[in-house]
Amino acid sequence: MEKSLVQVIEETKLVPVIKLMKVEDALPLVDALLLGGLPVAEITFRTSAAPASIETVRKNRPDVLVGAGTVLSIEQAQKAIDSGASFVVSPGFNPKVVDYCIDKKIPVFPGVTSPTEVEMGRDRGLKVLKFFPAEAAGGVEMLKALSAVYDNRFMPTGGISEKNLATYLALKNVLACGGSWMVKPELIEAGKFNEITEITRKAVALVKSL
């Protein structure tokens, strides 16, 4: 039986949050992640290269689960869907964007930091939510508090690195962690894909050891 998108993310437990300045870097970067053992990529809409990068990865590396991050508007959500993104992630809870994605039947993980926002997600049937900015919004203690009243799962992102990754993944309500420490923009721009592979390999090894 084919695995669901959530199952794939739960198995990897890591979602690299990627900022690409050039479409030409998309495949070398994804290949670096694959070599490191990570078949998931969240390409953010922080640059104009995002839609074409997602499309390039989808066409050339169909085994990679590629989503669109930092989606702030319906227009960006539409571009993400048109590019072939498998899921959409937003930093906050924009009801218009969330409802649009639900209507288009594309998985969406909006960012939340409060019980009110969690309940907005629950009203729409969302089981998994992004928790952003994780460290600034209370981190592990906040997630523990939310777990006392909600059965939702979360993808904390923001301030997460190899130093605190294990602490987050130890929580039952954490599905996976998002982070950019594996895919720092300066490494991508410098073409240091071997270094990205090594950092990714260490992160994957850490996850497997937990």
Image (cartoon, grey):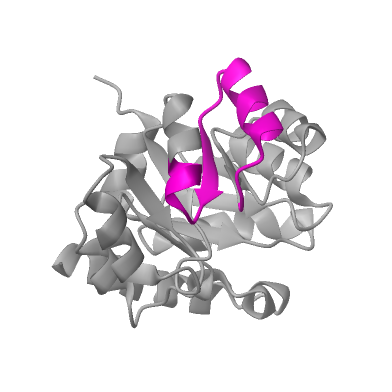
Residue at the spot 50% in from the left edge and 79% down from the top edge: 195
Residue 174 occupies which quadrant of the picture? bottom left
Question: Where is residue 168 drawn, in percent x and y?
Answer: 29, 66
In the image, residue 99 lies in the stretch drawn in magenta:
yes
Q: Is residue 192 left or right of residue 182?
A: right
User: Which quarter of the rendering shows the C terminus?
Assistant: bottom left
Q: Nearer the viewer, residue 46 or 110?
A: 110
Up-down: is 147 above or below 161? above
Residue at the spot 68% in from the left edge and 80% down from the top edge: 186
Q: Nearer the viewer, residue 153 or 60?
A: 153
Up-down: is 64 above or below 14? above
In the image, residue 159 lies in the stretch drawn in magenta:
no
Q: Which residues are magenta?
A: 91-118
Q: Nearer the viewer, residue 31 or 44?
A: 44
Question: Where is residue 143 drawn, in percent x and y?
Answer: 32, 60
Question: Where is residue 87 drawn, in percent x and y?
Answer: 54, 35
Say how many tags the image has.
0
Question: Where is residue 109 drawn, in percent x and y?
Answer: 51, 41
Q: Is residue 146 left or right of residue 55?
A: left
Up-down: is 209 above or below 27? below
Q: Nearer the viewer, residue 31 or 166?
A: 166
User: Which quarter of the rendering shows the N terminus?
Assistant: top left
Residue 141 occupies which quadrant of the picture? bottom left
Residue 57 occupies which quadrant of the picture? top right
